[in-house]
Amino acid sequence: MALSISKEFVDAIIAQAYAELPNECCGVILGPAGSGKAEKLKPMVNAAASPVFYEFAPVDLLSLYRGLDHEDEEIVVVYHSHPTSEAHPSSSDIEYAGEPAAHYVLVSTREEIAPNVEFRSFRIIDGAVTEEEVLISPQGE
């Protein structure tokens, strides 16, 4: 399995990760229900305001799920950043992964790899973590 994502979304997620330092950033990418297509980026507020944990703000989460039902959309990607560690799911990331059909994208902005970043995608199903290929399409596709 692979995640297909636009360069525009990759750039936006990386920009959000830097903008929200020193805390983790978070958000989702939505798509038409059943399509698996990542079409609508929705940055979320990290209510935890933490460099080692993220939590969607409850009001944002409620709005998100109401919108999914109303627009016949699904969560295709759940993303967040790791400001100080590798772009790999932590034990809490695995524990709270509640969207088995979603791709879980992690971006690491840790200092030792600057100015580069790690942008990786995983499937997390029933506690099992599997890394997958990320296919980045050019702007406008």
Image: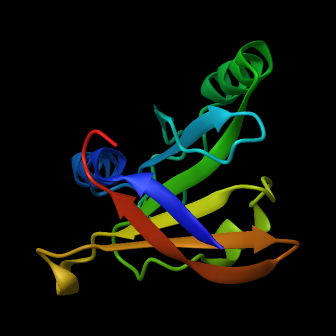
Horizontal side of residue 114 vs 57, given as left or right: left
Q: Is residue 135 above or below residue 23?
A: below
Residue lying furthest left: 115
Horizontal side of residue 95 vs 1, given as left or right: right
Q: Nearer the viewer, residue 37 or 14?
A: 37
Where does residue 62 sit, x and y in percent of width and height? 72, 23
Residue lying furthest right: 126
Q: Residue at x 81, y 59 (%)?
A: 100
Pick the quarter of the image with the C terminus: top left
Where does residue 89 sit, x and y in percent of width and height? 59, 76
Q: Nearer the viewer, residue 77 or 35?
A: 35
Q: Residue at x 71, y 81 (%)?
A: 129
Pick the quarter of the image with the N terminus: bottom right
Where does residue 56 sit, x and y in percent of width and height? 60, 40
Image colouring: rainbow
Q: Nearer the viewer, residue 124 or 132?
A: 132
Q: Residue at x 62, y 36 (%)?
A: 31
Horizontal side of residue 1 vs 39, given as left or right: right
Q: Residue at x 24, y 45 (%)?
A: 139
Horizontal side of residue 34 vs 117, given as left or right: right
